Image: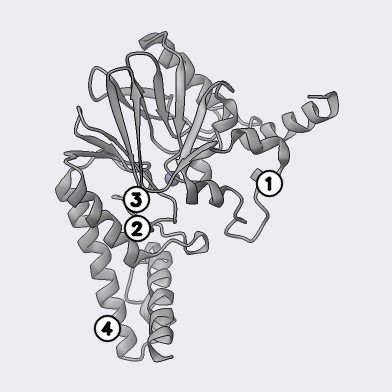
Amino acid sequence: MNKISATKLMTILLFVSFVSLSAQERNEEPVTFNKISEHLYEITGGRGARSGAYIGDNGVLIIDSKMTKQSVDQILNELKKITDKPIRYLVNTHSDGDHVNGNPFFPTSVTIIAHENCRKEFFHETRDGDPSRWNDPEMKQFIPSLTFTENLNIYLGSKKIELWYFGIGHTTGDIVVYFPEELTAFIGDQIFLNRPQLIHSYKGGNSFRHVETLTKMLETLDAQQFCSGHSSMTDHEGIRNHIEKIKGYQKKIKELIHCEKTLEEILKEFKDEEDRIVTTIYNELQEKSEIENK
Ligand SMILES: [Zn+2]
């Protein structure tokens, strides 16, 4: 790497990591490893979504990378207290910044894995229509280099980790990282428990597919516990309730459309914080009826 490109790279990295503010200034919780089992940890705190770490026989797998160099450094420091095994894999559950912007701060020896659609979404323009920062050639090395389309098993010695894709939902590339010994699944942003579910239509996400995808997950995996990006750990019932909640939105919005209500009128029937999910479902239903009437 020549001097100019090194400077350019640093500029990009500084931008990505928002280094102008320290963790304390943003009142962040410190990065904390919460033990699920001898091998598996949920990582809370720092800047970005909840993430995870699995300590295998001969190496470590990390799930999602938070957003800043400070948070990744904290992950690396906390990990050192638990194990001296090297990080071999970093899995991105999907392409949102709060799960992948930390990718450049992991050792370059780490293999970054994601669903093929997730990799494509790295290059997708932002919700505001701005070009993706990952288009910069300097950033290419931090984009997932190993992808799959249906499922992929990773073995860290005797320990098996299963990566699963159940379909479109929150985006087109969300995956589940399943630990069979722990009966625990990390599902990224495929569930929000304390705020309305995000569905990124601009990335091809779809609420109706989201319901199908989560249902398929429950039918396929024996998982008892589900860790996610922005909520506390939940169980089967938590996922089922979430599915019913989304179906409830869909049913109510469908009925209101049949009563010839406008989007503006429909939004008034819901809480302000539900504007985004309601608008998304409204648009999906309008599109559906357009297709059906053709
Ligand atoms: Zn997130």
Secondary element at tag 4: helix
Residue annotated with mark 3:
190
Q: Which quarter shows the C terminus?
A: bottom left
Dot 3 or dot 4: first in sequence order is: 3
**CA–CA distance between discs 2 and 4?**
20 Å
Q: Which quarter shows the N terminus?
A: top right
Residue annotated with mark 2:
196
Which residue is more in the foreground, 191 or 167?
167
Residue kind at label 4, given as amino acid type: Glu
216 left or right, relative to 262: left
Secondary element at tag 2: loop
Residue 67, percent from left and from top? 53, 35
Residue annotated with mark 1:
135
Residue kind at label 3, given as amino acid type: Gln
**CA–CA distance between discs 1 and 2?**
31 Å
Quarter of the picture for ligand 1? top left
User: Is there a contact, CB below 8 Å, between mark 3 and mark 2?
Assistant: no
User: Is there a contact, CB below 8 Å, between mark 2 and mark 4?
Assistant: no
Residue kind at label 1, given as amino acid type: Asn
Residue 153, percent from left and from top? 33, 33
User: Is there a contact, CB below 8 Å, between mark 1 and mark 2?
Assistant: no
> Looking at the image, is mark 3 or mark 1 nearer the viewer?
1
Secondary element at tag 1: helix
